[in-house]
Image (cartoon, rainbow, N blue to C red):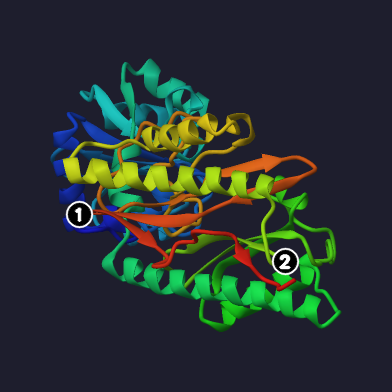
Amino acid sequence: MPPVSAGLLASQAGVRRVQRALQELDLDGWLLYEFHGINRIAVALLGLGKTTRRSFVLIPEEGEPVALIHAIEATSWRHWPFARRVYSGWRDMEAQLAELVAGRKRLAMEISPGGAVPNLDYVPAGMASTLLDLGLELASSGDLVSRFHSAWTPAQLADHKRAAEIVAGVARRAFTQAAKAVEAGAPTTEGALSDWIRAELRGKGLVEQVDCIVAIGPRAADPHYAPVGAGETITRGQLLLIDLWGAFPKSVAADQTWMGMLGASVDARTQKVWEAVRDGRDAALAFLRQRASEGVDTRGYEVDDVARALISERGFGDRFVHRTGHSIDTELHGSGPNLDNLETRDDRLLVPGVGFSVEPGIYLPGELGIRAEVNVYWGADGPEVTPAEVQREIFLLLEE
């Protein structure tokens, strides 16, 4: 399946591709709703700039798309090549909306039943109820979003692979920086090392979505830890987590987590936790490879179940407090399927072209936090894992 680009639904070719999918899914159309930028999926697919009034676009299963827009926003829609209807008052809007969907029974929208998938739930309850009152059945556009919004282009895949090796290299050099500072008797801090990492990533061309988490053992027990000011000093004998990410312009980020020990050995407790995390990650990757080889449809929650089951068997299930992975598209936390059956039940298909992280973690408050993160592109032949070299053991950074 060829991947997508921004403005897909403002082109004849893009609309034809979507209409084929609508027919496969037995949908009467895709109704996109946008107001003031709240629906980032609609903004991207329609190629919109700034808008401040409610708008609707119906992509029917066959025939020409129609946009229903406010009278003051013609400029924002001047790129739109298809039919356009205009309203000014709310009564007019509701009447024209009813005409727009008349005769349709089942329409896809950016909704998530039960609010299960928040990054797909962009239609306000009031607007959804208005449409339901018109006799419509509203279906989630989740699999359409994956195929036509979150799938990577070949150029984005190539950029991501290059970014992945840069990110991995910066992580390794960051551990070396921390170790050298300890050896020199002037240990660095979490904040200073974070600044160094961000500068290195930008210096290598990853100038978008750039940031990191640097946390010593107990602080890493907070999965989204951010130091106050300089943060903690990174000294001998400490476990160090480095999570870092960045993207080339208008492309797909690489997002990785690595673990190092400021010492020559790892204690038995830390090693046990590390092995549970690492093996949970690897179980998820093995499951993905097996499903791909068997040609079996795979959904996000199933991958989460595999990683979570292994970590639970090792006795740490209650300390794995987040999903196994998040979607990655042109946003670090994208709109495609997540690997999640904890925070949500993400039952969306992993369709060819989507990407996501695989990052189980175990967090023991006051003691330590360990995470092992790689990224996966779900290609036509199965999962492609980045970076090329996956961490097998905690890096030992100092000699006795």
The residue under label 2 is 262
Task: Choose between 355 and 370: the one closer to the eye.
Answer: 370
Mark 2 Cα shell of 10 Å, populated few (<14), some (14-19), many (≥20): many
Q: Is residue 236 above or below residue 356?
A: below
Q: In the rendered image, which quarter is residue 349 located in?
A: top left
Assign a secondary structure to mark 1.
loop
| Residue 325 appearing in the image | no
Q: Residue 164, how many percent across, how many down? A: 45, 69
Most extreme residue toward the front, as rendered?
A: 400
Q: Looking at the picture, which amino acid does disc 2 mark?
A: Leu
Give the number of callouts. 2
Quadrant showing the N terminus: bottom left
The residue under label 1 is 381
Q: Residue 220, how many percent across, how many down? A: 71, 51
Residue located at (47% from left, 42% from top): 280
Residue located at (45% from left, 62% from top): 390
Residue located at (52% from left, 75% from top): 169
Q: Looking at the picture, which amino acid does disc 1 mark?
A: Asp
Label 1 and label 2: CA atoms lie apart by 40 Å
Q: Is residue 35 left or right of residue 381?
A: right
Circles 1, 2 touching at the beta carbon (< 8 Å): no
Q: Residue 48, how many percent across, how many down? A: 41, 57
| Residue 141 appearing in the image | yes
Q: Is residue 33 above or below residue 354?
A: above
Q: Is residue 264 left or right of residue 335?
A: right
Q: Is residue 297 above or below residue 271?
A: above
Q: Is residue 170 left or right of residue 285?
A: right
Look at discs 1 and 2 and give the one toward the viewer: 2
